[in-house]
Amino acid sequence: MKIGIYNPYFDTFGGGERYMLTLGEYWSKMHEVSIFWDDNTIIDLSQIRFKLDLSRITVVPNVFKNGSLVKKMLVSATYDLIVFLSDGSVPMSLAKKNILHFQVPFPKVSMNAWKKSRYQQIICNSKFTQKYLDPTIKIPTTVIYPPVANEEFYPRKKENVIVSVGRFNGHYNVKKQDILIKVFIEMYKAKKCDCFCRTF
């Protein structure tokens, strides 16, 4: 099979990028896999960052960012499957099969009837995302949890600690650090906890 992977954020090297490239690593053992991006160094940088074997994946021009509608249609039609990580938008595609992946529960996803007919499956990274994703989409949805390198972790003594892991990002604050900080301050002032915030 010829499989394409589109992610508008490959160069942010975050969890969504690891998710999509782990799929690519697995599929590339048996299929022809390419990612839509305009810089070939993304494969080498991603292999270092995520410790994945992406040597069988090719980089092709990112028609979903820079291509005309006609170009998107012509290129996508050559694929058996394209998986799109959605930033809230839904790309046009004529691939035989199309999958949308959501990392966050967008409450409103704009899709006309034709676009809906082109997508056979939605994948969510959690039941939370699945539950709060726009209910009007009406496309079958499956939860596939993010890949975790379990071999890199070892159990330690349980502590009474709350940890929130995420980068500070001004573009789209999905980790809600501002709310976490506000709640910690309120709890500390109310003497409901002996807590502190630390960033690394």
Image: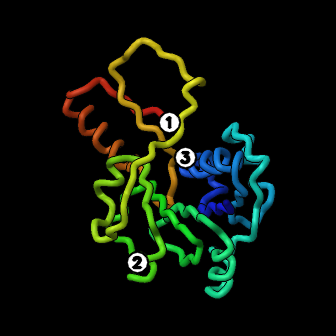
Find out whether the residues at labels 3 and 1 contact each other: C-beta distance under 8 Å. no
- Residue 37 placement, left or right of 14: right
Mark 2 vs mark 3: in front: 2
Circle 2: residue type: Met
Which callout, 3 or 1, points at the residue further toward the start of the chain? 3
What's the mark number on residue 111? 2
Residue behind mark 3: 15
Q: Residue drawn 33% across and 20% down?
A: 160
Circle 3: residue type: Gly
Q: Position of residue 133 (x, y in %)?
A: 33, 61
Q: Residue furthest top?
A: 157
Q: CA distance from mark 2 to mark 3?
A: 25 Å
Q: Quadrant of the C terminus?
A: top right
What's the mark number on residue 199? 1
Q: Residue drawn 54% across and 51% down?
A: 16
Which callout, 1 or 2, points at the residue further toward the start of the chain? 2
Find out whether the residues at labels 2 and 3 contact each other: C-beta distance under 8 Å. no
- Residue 169 placement, left or right of 54: left
Nearer the observer, 105 or 97? 97
Q: Residue drawn 73% across and 41% down?
A: 53
Label 1: element kind: loop
Say if 142 sits above or below 70 in the image.
above
Say if 148 sits above or below 122 in the image.
above
Q: Position of residue 126 (x, y in %)?
A: 38, 47
Q: Is residue 8 visible?
A: no
